[in-house]
Each structure stands twice: as C-alpha cells, then as structure tokens.
Image (cartoon, rainbow, N blue to C red):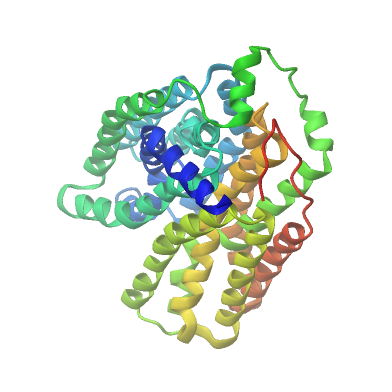
Amino acid sequence: MQEISKRAATLRELRQNWSTLLGCTLGVALGVAAMPFYTTGVFVGSLQTDFGWTRSQLSAASLASTFMVVLCAPIAGLAIDRWGVRRPVAFSMIALALGLATLAAMSGSFIQYLLIQSLMFAFAVASTPISFSRAVNEHFDVARGLALGLTLSGTGLAAFLAPPAVAAIIAEQGWRAAYLQMAGLVLLAMPVVVYLLGHSSKRPTAPAALAAIKTGEEPERLTYGAMLADPRFQRLLAIFFFLALGVSGFVLHLIPLLSDAGMSATDAAGIQANLGLAVIVGRLAVGAAVDHFFAPRVAALSLSLTIAGIAALAIFGPSVAPAAAFAIGFALGAEVDLIGYLTVRYFGLGDYGRRYGVLYGAFVLGTGFSPLLISTIAGRFGGYDPALWTCAGCVTIAVVFLATAPRFAALSGEDHP
C-alpha cells in the first residue's frame, strides 16, 4: 500500500511540475556545461588549420575555463540563493550567447580566444546545474531523484546530438557559422527556459521549501568556514573531486587510447558514442533508484561497475572497449545529479546554492585535471595502462567514501531512504 501511495505521489509531482522539469532539462542541454563542453573538440581541427594553434594551447584554454567555473560557481550559488533561479539563468544564457557570437568574430590571437573562453564560462556559470538542480529540488520531493536524473540527462542529449550537428555545419558553412548558430539557438531558447521555470505551480512542493515559504523568515547565512568544517561536506567534496578526476578525462582520451591499441579511428569514434548514451542511462537509472534506496549505497554500487570497466580495459584492451566505455559513461551520468541530491538530503534547501556551487567547483576542478592526469601518466610510462589503474584508484576512493557515508538527518519532516 505504501509503495502504491509513493507511486501516486511521484506521478502527481511529475504532472504538477512538468514545465519546471522541461525548462530545466532544456536549460541544462544548452547551458555552458553541456553544449560548448561537448562540442569543443569539433572545432579543434578548424582552429588548428586557420590559426596554427596547437592542441596543448587549446587544452590550456579548456583548463582556464575550468578554473573560471571553480572560482565563479560559489558566487553564482550565492546569487541563486538570494534572487532565485530565473534571473541568474537569463543573465547567464545571454552571456553564453554573446560569448559564442564573439568566438565567431575572433581573429587569430590565441590570447583573445583564451580571454573570450574564460569570460564566457565565468558569466555563463548560472546556466549549469547549479541553477537547474535548485529548481528541481524546490519542486520535487518524492520523485526528486528521478526528476534530477531527467533534468541532467540534458547533458547526455547534448553529448549525443550536438557534436555531429556542429560538425555538419562546420563542413558546409565553416566554424564561424557554427559558433553563430549555436549562439542563436541559446538566445532563442533563453525566454522559453525562463518562462517554463516560472510556469509551474506557484509554490514548490518539497516540504523543506514549503516550510521556508510559510515562515517567511530569512535564514541566517552560513559562513564558508562553517560549511567547510562540516565532516559531511568534506566527504562530499572528496567524493566528487576524485570521481571527476577518475572518469572525466576519458571524454578526451578514450579515442586516442583505443587508436594506440590498434583500433581504427572510425571504430573508436563509434565506441566514444557509448559515453553519451550511458550518460543518459546513468542519470535516469541512478536518479530513479535513489528515490527508493539509500543514495550513497546506490552510487557506490553503480561506481563499482565503473571501476570494473576501467580495470577490464587495462587488462583486456579494445576487446572490452564497448562495455568499458558504457561503464565510464554511466559514472559520468550519475555524478552531477548526485551532487544536487546529496546536498539537499544532507543539508536541506537553506544555502543550497552556495553549497552546490562549492561542490560543483570541486567536481569541475577534478574534471579539468583529469585529462592532464591521464596524459601525464601515459607519457611518463609510455602507455595508457598505468593511467587506467590510477583512474580506477581515484574512483575507488569515491566509492569508499560513499559506502561509509552517514544516514540522512530528518529535514522539515521529510522521511527518505
């Protein structure tokens, strides 16, 4: 009977807040953490040909963008806590569109490219899951995990659809036209996303959010020192940094790894596509599971499969590449929605934006260093196998922290697995 009641509550939440869910999913797919991130590699060949830039230079630009996100994510979180999600999202999507349009007009100066990229990621940071996970957490309670999974599957859609579409535009019209069309898409989508975020039920359905509305009290702001001193928060920082460090670099290195092992570039690219599919599956599967079972244990079990996939790739090579790529992509699919889910379950919605911003910054920092870690180890030892074992070790650290995580405290009358 309880399971039937929970299923009915899940359907009710999805029916009442479908517009918020749709707006968040669209916003995530077109935000700076998805579409520009997954299409950066598509522009590499054209920029090298036209300007003579090296891959090391372009990698340095990506790392600089990563640092900008790390620095600006807590600031964006503070703005979201103060003004809600709609205004920061609108500002950041406009900034993203302007940044992409400016890239289309740039000259051959690498410093100019570096500056545009850095400023674009800094001002567009509220178009990341920092904003959209907050909106989902406010409006969903029983179906929170599933809703986060659906929302953040937007990045998987971007990974699956954007690269071939952008590549086709570059082939037919050139890279400048591709940047301009991406900018136009973001600008056209912005009012739709903002409208959908405000079109849902006037009041959030999550009990913690309802309690805040009823009291009308301004909560005392948590200091960053107190936040960082909390052992639970320290645990989450370690989990998401080491998880990102262990898996994110494969977005860049999987194809070179397989090519070095003797696989054709075409076959390697086909296996790379498994990452995008697995991101979607991972987010939906883990999101649905954590609504019924204790989330850290679900994550630990799921990521154990990722460790097995990375280890199998080191031992057996390309013969297990499809399964290994799916296992790695599954971890990429589970990580960002877990940040939002675990943040609100452990700490509630008070100061959510700032907490999420710091945790997301740690995750992005790991994402930025992961390709460098893999390439450095592979270069030092003359092959990818030691790097694979190092990545498996990083994910193992995250799994241990998850498997030993404390239970959730009761927040505003909530009762969850």
Percent coordinates x, y for residue 61 in the rendering? 50, 45
- Residue found farthest to the front: 1
> Which residue lies at the image location 63% right of the left edge and 40% below the top edge?
361
**Relative to 312, residue 252 above or below:** above
**Relative to 14, residue 95 above or below:** above
Residue 253 visible in the picture: yes
The foreground one among 180 and 346 is 346
> Which residue lies at the image location 47% right of the left edge and 33% below the top edge?
115
The foreground one among 136 and 354 is 136
The foreground one among 55 and 310 is 310
Quadrant of residue 410 in the image? top right
> Which residue lies at the image location 39% right of the left edge and 44% below the top edge?
36
Q: Is residue 260 left or right of residue 80?
A: left
Quadrant of residue 348 in the image? top right
Residue 49 visible in the picture: no
Q: Is residue 50 left or right of residue 25?
A: left
Percent coordinates x, y for residue 78 in the rendering? 62, 23
Quadrant of residue 179 in the image? top left
- Residue found farthest to the left: 172
> Which residue lies at the image location 59% right of the left edge and 17% below the top edge?
213
Percent coordinates x, y for residue 261 in the rendering? 47, 83
The foreground one among 1 and 150 is 1
Percent coordinates x, y for residue 5 in the rendering? 52, 46
**Relative to 88, residue 287 above or below:** below
**Relative to 28, residue 289 above or below:** below
Q: Is residue 277 left or right of residue 401?
A: left
